[in-house]
Image (cartoon, grey):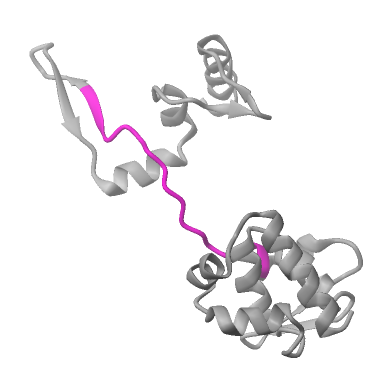
Amino acid sequence: MDAKEFGLKLKEIRKEKKITLLDLKARTGYSDSYLSQIENGYKDLPKPALLRKLAIGLDVSPIYLMNLAGYSDSYIDVENDLVKYEGNNPFKEEKFLNEMRNIDVNLPCTEEIKTEYGEQTIRELSDDELRRRLFDLHDLLNMKIDLYYKNGLLTDEKRKKVRTILELIFE
């Protein structure tokens, strides 16, 4: 694929996702005029580092854009870490998949506790406690938030079953 074809495909993806050039500029840090030049084929095929940023900005797989740009079955040098693309298995590119993204998640930031006198009180959780609880299965199952398994909402009954199974395994 040449730069013109790649640019047209990139523009198509952006428009399908209803993302403007200004939105993509905000998401990638590249100017809208530069992005427009890429889409119109006035620039060479982007390097892997730019493809990664474009993929994140467009919410597509970096490997998909790498393949579009013709990097499949080759070595990709991003920030000097050579990553070999092996056949059709995109999961070999751990450095691409371990990219961090921030998303907003609302968690209960307080908990009910009993005092030594048996009274109920509420205490605020620290940021560290919230971070830990986000990935603690026991805490997640006990939170009053929607939890899913394979896109199915976990009912109270299913949560209880999961807790029981986990207790049998770990305790």
> Which residue lies at the image location 87% right of the left edge and 83% below the top edge?
2
> Which residue lies at the image location 65% right of the left edge and 72% below the top edge?
52
**From this viewpoint, is residue 98 visible?**
no
Q: Give the range drawn in magenta.
A: 96-112
Residue 36 on the magenta segment: no
Residue 84, given in percent of the width and then of the height, sits at 81, 77
Residue 103 on the magenta segment: yes
Res. 118 image quadrant: top left
Magenta segment, prevailing SS (helix, strand or loop): loop
Task: Determine whether, in the image, residue 70 is placed left or right of residue 78.
Answer: right
- Please give the count of numbered marks on the rendered protein: 0
> Which residue lies at the image location 87% right of the left edge and 70% below the top edge?
86
Residue 122, given in percent of the width and then of the height, sits at 16, 25
As drawn, which residue projects farthest toward the left?
A: 117
**From this viewpoint, is residue 92 visible?**
yes
Residue 47, given in percent of the width and then of the height, sits at 71, 85
Task: Determine whether, in the image, residue 139 is placed left or right of residue 87.
Answer: left
